[in-house]
Amino acid sequence: MRFLYDENAGNDCLEVKGDNFNHLKARRVSVGERLDIRNLKDGYSYLYEIKEFSRKAVCELVFKSLAKNYESDLTLAWAVVQPSVIEKALPSLNEIGVTKILFVYTDFSQKNIKLDFDRFERILIGSSEQCGRNSIIKFEIFASVSELLKVYENVSLVDFGGVNLDAASKNEILFVGSEGGFSDAERTKFAKSYALNSPNILRSNTAIISVAAKMLL
């Protein structure tokens, strides 16, 4: 773990409880040791010194510094799929450096699916603690492709039969479909379509990780 997350990081005094405290106990830390604690919002790394360690850790702020942030400007659109599928991909997308994901209910999405963004955020916080990223992916959600295109114009599909993804620009928002891809009616709404260079049909989570890696790594 590269640092601990606490939404109150930046306060002069901080109490570490719950899972974070249990993690510190497992690491056998003691009074006098210093911890890097971040809130993943303001770009800072806060160094705290442990002053008390019993049923909780009481820490005092020593100093703060701007942490290096390797976040990209990459925004991806993703058709809504089963939450378990999304959850498997989120840590990898976070590590690669995706900035934002636009979730879209498409014709082949199950409309009864509800996305738990609080749970997604907890997964991303754990990912950032492990990989050192000083932020987490942001989310937006749209009820349909038409609603997406009212807000974002530079969207291109990642679909069967498109031109090679090497031709895509980082200024475009690449849109990955569900397991069934996109309907014919949806395809007519987009001027550009790209394809991954794979002879196999990829699962939705594999496709979006591949797109992110292609654009950023």
Image (tube, rainbow, N blue to C red):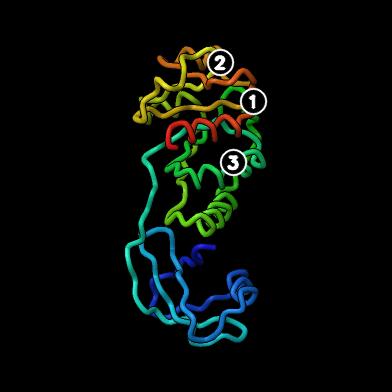
64 or 7: which is nearer to us?
Answer: 64
**Residue 192 percent across, percent down from the top left:** 42, 16
Which of the 4 image quarters holds residue 148?
top left
Q: How far apart are marks 2 and 1 (CA)?
A: 12 Å
Q: Residue 179 carries which label?
A: 1
Q: Which of marks 2 and 3 is nearer the N terminus?
A: 3
**Residue 67 percent across, percent down from the top left:** 36, 60
Say few, some or many: other residues with alpha carbon within 10 Å of mark 1 (under 14 / 14 to 19 / 20 or more): some
Quadrant housing the C terminus: top left
Which of the 4 image quarters holds residue 22?
bottom right
Judged left or right of residue 201, residue 93 is left
Secondary structure at numbered mark 2 = strand
Say few, some or many: other residues with alpha carbon within 10 Å of mark 3 (under 14 / 14 to 19 / 20 or more): some
Q: What residue type is labelled 1?
A: Glu
Q: Residue at x 58, y 21 (%)?
A: 198
Q: Which residue is drawn at 45% across and 54% down?
A: 133
Looking at the image, the residue that sits furthest to the front is: 217
Q: Which of pointers 3 and 1 indicates the residue nearer the eye?
A: 3
Q: Earlier in the sequence, mark 2 or mark 1?
A: 2
Secondary structure at numbered mark 1 = loop
Q: Which amino acid does label 2 sit on?
A: Phe
**Residue 179 percent across, percent down from the top left:** 64, 25
Number of dots carrying numbers = 3
Q: Which mark is residue 89?
A: 3
Q: Distance between the residues labelled 2 and 3?
A: 21 Å
Q: Which of pointers 2 and 1 indicates the residue nearer the eye?
A: 2
Tag 2 residue? 160
> CB under 8 Å between callouts 3 and 1?
no
Q: What residue type is labelled 3?
A: Ala
**Residue 41 percent across, percent down from the top left:** 40, 58
Say few, some or many: other residues with alpha carbon within 10 Å of mark 2 (under 14 / 14 to 19 / 20 or more): few
Q: Which residue is drawn at 55% across and 12% down?
A: 184
